[in-house]
Image: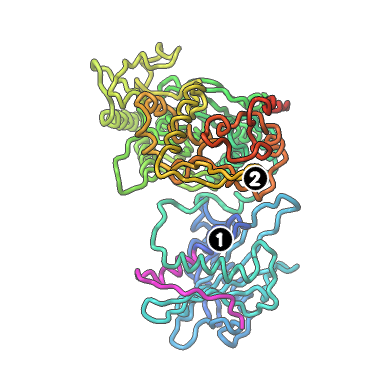
Amino acid sequence: MGLVGTAAVRDGGAALPHGFWAAVRVWLEKPQVANRRLCGAAIEAEGTVSLGEGGEASRPFAAVWGGGSGGGQEGRAASAGAVELGRLWREVRGQLSAGHGYLPPPLTPWGGPGRRSELRAVLRTLLPRGRSVGPPAPPTKELAVEDVDTGTVTFLPLEENSEGKYQIKKCNIYQIQLTHIKDEEWSVSIVAPFPEDWFSDGIAYPKLAWLGNELLSRLAKWSVEQKPSEFKSTLSLISVAKYSKVYQGLKEKYREMVKVWPEVTDPEKFVYEDVAIAAYLLILWEEERKEKGLTKKQSFVDLGCGNGLLVHILNNEGHSGRGIDVRRRKIWDMYGQETHLEESTIMPGDSHLFPDTDWLIGNHSDELTPWIPVIAARSSYSCCYFVLPCCFFDFHGKYSRRQSKKTQYREYLDFVAQVGFVCGFHVEEDCLRIPSTKRVCLIGKNRTYPSTERALIDKQITQYINNRQTCAVVTCDRRVGFNHKDHSDGVCKEADSELPENETDAAGTIWMPGFQPREKVERIRNCASLPRDFVDDVVLNVANLLLNATPQKSCSNIHGGNMNTWNQGESLSLKEVAEHLNKETLKRLKSEYGGLQTLLKNNHQVFEVLNGRVHIRDWRKEKPSTKTKPEVKRRLSAEAFKTRLCWFFIHHPDGCSLPSESCPYAHGTEELRQSQIIKKKKYIQ
C-alpha cells in the first residue's frame, strides 16, 4: 500500500549514502533535468527545524525568503528567512498527526528513540515552463523535509488559503527513501500515503507512474554517479523565478521572428538562443542597478554581433547600445532604425576602445573572445564584460591545447577566465539555458584593484599578451606577424600586409600586429562550390570502387515480373576510399570543411555514409517517414520530383533498382521536369 516504486542500487564505489543526498539535491534545485515541464525551482528558504515543542528554525543555509536563489543573494536576509521558515514549520507540523512521527503510514516516521531531534527543511517554488496556449501555470510551493537518520526526504505540497496561510495538500505528499539491504546492495523507493487520491496537474505533479519510473530511475542513477560536473549549474548567478518570467515574456514578444527569418541558419535555434541570452542579461543588469543604486539602464556594445537579434532585443527593452560585425546580414534591414548595427572590422587596439560604454558583449565572438576582457579593462575602470565562448581562439589565432587532463572546452574556458583575472576582474562563471553545447558564459563586472593602479594592470596585460604570443608566434625579419591560416606551412607574412584595408595607417595602435579578423566575405567551404565536373568525377570513381569491390553483394530486383540481380556493391571505410583517390583530388577536398565525407553526403542520391563507412544507396530500402511533414516540405518534395536525372539509370551497370514510376528521379530526359526555382519570401516590416 502506497509504494510507488523501488529501484535496486549496487554501490561498488562507496558512493552511498552521500550520493543519495547529492541526487536529492539535484531534484530539489534542478527538477527540470527530470521534469521537462518545469523550467526550474527557486529555493526560498532553507535551515534546520526542530521536532520539539518550539519548532523553531535555526542555522539557516543560504536562507533567502521570497527572492529565489542566485544573483549573489545567498545569505541575504538569512535571519528573516529563518524566522519565516520557523513560522511555516509550526503551521505545517500542526496539520500533521503527532502519532507515527507526524507522518501518515506507510511513510517512514521522523525522529524516534536514539535519533536527533532536528530535521533539515527546504522551501522551494516549482517554476513551470510557459505554455504555447493559455495563461502560464502558477508556481507551486513545496516544503521538503530531510531526515538523515532515516535516509528519507518527505515532500509536502503547500497551498495558500484566503488568509495567506499555507495548507498541506495531503493527497500529493510523497517520500523518497534510501534503504541499505546488505554489503553493496541498496534500494531507493518512492512512497505516497494516499495514491488513490493523487492529483496530477501534468506539470509540477505528474502521474504517480512517472514518479515510480522516470524520477526513480534517475535518482538511482544519480545516487551512484561519482563523476563531478566540470561546470556550474544553470543560472547560478540570477534568480530562476525572474528568469522564467522574463524569458517567457520575451519569447512571446519575439516569436514571430521565427516565421520571417531570412538567413540560412536555423531560425528556432538562433531566435530562442538570443531571447534566452537577452533575458539573462536583463536580469543580471537589473541586479547590478540594485546593487550599485543606479537608475539609468546600462549601455552596451556587442562585438561580433552576427545577425544582430540580441542587439535588437536589448535596444527594444530600453538599453542603449549597438552591435558591430565585419559582415552585414540580410536580417539587419528588418529591425528598423531603433536597432543600431554597424558593419566594421574590429582590430584590438587604441582605436577600438569604448570609454562611455557600461558593458561589452561577446556572444560567440570567435577571434575577439579573448580580447574582450582586455578591451573592457582598457576602455574604462567601470566597463564590464559578458562573453559566451564558442570557437577556440587565442590572441593571435587558433587556440592550441596545453593540458590533456581537461576537455578542450573546459581548458579554453579556463584560459578566457585567466585573461579576465589578468585584466583585473573578478571573473564569474555561469551556465545558460540555450539550445547549444557551448552554454558557459564568463562575466567580469567588478575589479580586483583600485582605480589608481590602472597603469600597473595595463603593463601586466601587455606582458601577458606578449608571453602568449612568444609561445606560438612565428618571427620573420624581427617583425611579429602571425597568420593562423598559414601556420601549418610555417609561412610568416609581414604584419602590415595582414591588416585589413584602411587599417594599415593605424598599425601603431594595434596591440598585436598580425591579428586575423574574420573575413568580410564568408567563404563557402561545404563542397557546394566545387565544379560540377569535379564532383561528378569523384562520385563516379567512388561508386565504381564500391561496385567492383569483392565479394559483391547482390539483391533481388523484380521489375515487371523479370527477376534480376542488382549489384549493391561493398561498403568501405572513408579511409579506404581516400586511399584510392589521387593526391590532387584529396588536396582539393581537404580545403573544404568535411572534405570527402561532406561531398559523399551531399550526393545522397548515390551514397549512404553510416558510422564512417560508405555504402551504395539502395532506394528500395528507403522507408517512408512516419512523421507528417510540414506543408512547406511536402510542397518542396512535390516540386523537386523528377527534376534531376537518376544517377543509377545512367551509370549503374544494372540500372536503377526502382521502376520509373517509383523513382523520384527521371529515367531519361523524356521524364525530366523543369525545375521550379523556389525563392524565399521577402518580408517587409
Observer-nearest of 661 and 345 = 661
Name above or below for residue 658 compared with residue 104: above
Classify the position of the N terminus by image quarter.
bottom right
- Mark 1: give few (<14), some (14-19) or many (20+) Cα within 10 Å: some
Compare residues 19 and 574 and report the one nearer the observer: 574
Q: What's the residue at 54%, 21% (across, down)?
A: 343
Whole-percent x, y for residue 132 in the image: 71, 49
Question: Which SS class for mark 2?
Answer: loop
Q: Which residue is mark 2?
A: 561
- Say if the magenta span includes residue 20: yes
Give the residues in magenta.
Answer: 1-25
Which residue in the rendered view is the most extreme toward the left?
A: 478
Give me the residue at 48% from left, 28% from top.
Answer: 527
Mark 2: give few (<14), some (14-19) or many (20+) Cα within 10 Å.
few
Q: The disc labelled 1 sits on which kind of residue?
A: Ala
Foreground of the two, 79 or 423: 423
Name the element at disc 1: loop
The residue that label 1 is drawn on is 34
